[in-house]
Amino acid sequence: MRSFTESIVEDAALAWLEGLGYSVLYGPDLAVGEPAAERSDPNFRDVVLDGRLLQALVRLNPELPPEALDDAFRKLKRTDAPSLIERNRAVHRMLVDAGVLQRDRCPLEDRAGALGDVTGMQTEQRIEVVELRAARPGGEAGVGVERVQLREAGAAMEGERL
């Protein structure tokens, strides 16, 4: 009988992502100092590819002003929760359910004119973070990264794939 290992799940996940139009990148190639570097922390604490996240927010939410996109970026990068599990759950909700942003609107943003002067009024806006459909022709759905090295609280962790 063949044993069930973590690498079986990892290989299946990467194959599934490729089938959806995702690129699969090799983690060490993205490290600081490498020609294809996309990570910014030489100590391997960054788990988000900042440039790709910003590009995705702009592409998926072209109707939103830059301030709203910056707010979403900050909320995704710095989720306030007392534990790692709760932070992961909060980010997961933002990724799957579309994040909710609270921000002030000005009268110029009320294109319909129904609300009149709404300066200072708090509104709720939804922002798409991840497109879970296959990539459009000529586009890219995202990336899966293989062999990512992460470090938290001084302890190094190296995953075969993430």
Image (cartoon, rainbow, N blue to C red):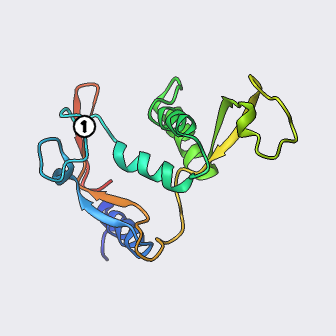
Q: Residue at x 28, y 34 (%)?
A: 45
Q: Quadrant of residue 151?
A: top left
- The residue type indicated by label 1 comes to Ser
Residue at mark 1? 40
Q: Position of residue 159 (x, y in %)?
A: 26, 50
Residue at (28, 25) in percent of width and height: 153
Q: Is residue 145 visible?
A: yes
**For mark 1, does the 10 Å Cα neighbourhood hold few (<14), some (14 to 19), or many (20 or more) residues?**
some
Between residues 30 and 69, which one lies in front from this camera angle? 69
Count the marks.
1
Identity of the residue drawn at 49% across and 35% down:
70
Q: Percent from the top left, x then y, of residue 6?
A: 32, 60
Q: Quadrant of the N terminus?
A: bottom left
Q: Secondary structure at mark 1?
A: loop
The reply to whether residue 48 is in sight is no
Indicate whether 33 appears above or below 103: below
Give the left or right position of residue 36, taking residue 78 as reference.
Answer: left
Q: Is residue 161 above or below residue 31?
A: below
On screen, residue 10 above or below 1: above
